[in-house]
Every structure is written in structure tokens, then in C-alpha cells.
């Protein structure tokens, strides 16, 4: 009951947001060491020319990775097709082998059962 009885504190109204001109003036007047500019900037990038080089390096790296992906993907598709053909060949060879075994068994034991032992 005590918490509901507290008076609400009236906050002052918010100031109007700065204009674009005021923001630009503030940014232009800021020092290079201002935490706003240094907190998010990578330390190993001294200037815009380095950023351009890094961007180009990154683009080249992505291009090379994409090429490697495409080449590897083609190889995998070829390998999959070769394996499919080999599997079919092995299945046919297995069926032929089973037929041959059956023929040999029938020829070797024409009158006796294959499961009987002497």
C-alpha cells in the first residue's frame, strides 16, 4: 500500500533534437581522439586508403573462395555420378554372381539337397 501512495515525479520535457547543421558542426569540431570516433574504428586502419585496400583484399578473397566452391561442387557432382555408375555395375555383377552360384550349385548337386550333410 505504501508504494502506491508515492507521488509520481514529473520529469522535465525533452529538449528538441539537434538539427543537421548542429550535428555537422559538432562532428567537425570534435577531436580525432574523441571516443565516439575511436571506440568503433579498428586500430590497424590508419586511413581511407587502407580501408579501400582491405575491401579489395576481402573482395578478392571472397571471389577466390567462390571459385573454389564452384570447382569443388563440380568435382563432387562428377564423383557422385561416377559412384552411381559403379554402384549400378556392382549390383549387376552381384546379380550375375548369384545366378552363377545358383547354376553351379544345381550342376554340382543335381539329385541331392544342398542342405543335407553326409
Image (cartoon, grey):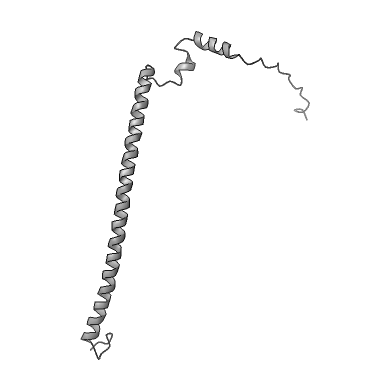
In this rendering, the answer to whether 49 lies above or below 105 is above
Total marks placed: 0
Looking at the rendered image, the quarter that the N terminus falls into is top right
Determine which quarter of the picture holds residue 32: top left
The residue lying at 25 percent from left, 74 percent from top is 97
The answer to whether residue 44 of the structure is visible from this angle is no
Q: Residue furthest bottom?
A: 111
Return the residue nearer the eye: 113 or 48: 48
Rendered location of residue 11, percent (x, y): 71, 18
Please, is residue 87 above or below residue 56 in the view? below
Q: Residue at x 22, y 81 (%)?
A: 104
Q: Residue at x 37, y 26 (%)?
A: 55
* Residue 42 quadrant: top left
* Residue name at image x 29 percent, y 49 percent: 75
Tell me if 14 is positioned left or right of 97 in this view. right
Residue 106, how many percent across, how many down?
Answer: 25, 85
- As drawn, is 97 to the left or to the right of 55? left
- Give the quarter of the image for residue 10: top right
Q: Position of residue 68 (x, y in %)?
A: 31, 41
Left or right: 10 as drawn, with respect to 24: right
Q: Quadrant of the C terminus?
A: bottom left
Q: Nearer the viewer, residue 27 or 92?
A: 92
Q: Position of residue 51 (x, y in %)?
A: 38, 22
Among all residues in the image, which is located at the extreme left?
108
- Relative to 61, does residue 49 appear above or below in the rendering? above
Q: Is residue 93 visible?
A: yes
Amino acid at each position: 500500500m505504501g508504494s502506491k501512495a508515492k507521488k509520481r515525479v514529473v520529469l522535465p520535457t525533452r529538449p528538441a533534437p539537434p538539427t543537421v547543421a548542429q550535428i555537422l558542426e559538432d562532428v567537425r569540431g570534435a577531436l580525432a581522439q574523441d571516443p565516439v570516433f575511436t571506440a568503433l574504428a579498428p586500430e590497424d586502419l590508419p586511413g581511407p586508403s587502407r580501408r579501400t585496400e582491405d575491401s579489395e583484399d576481402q573482395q578478392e578473397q571472397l571471389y577466390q573462395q567462390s571459385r573454389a566452391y564452384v570447382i569443388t561442387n563440380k568435382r563432387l557432382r562428377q564423383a557422385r555420378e561416377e559412384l552411381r555408375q559403379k554402384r549400378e555395375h556392382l549390383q549387376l555383377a552381384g546379380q550375375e554372381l548369384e545366378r552363377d552360384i545358383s547354376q553351379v550349385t544345381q550342376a554340382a548337386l543335381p539329385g541331392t539337397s544342398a542342405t543335407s550333410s553326409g
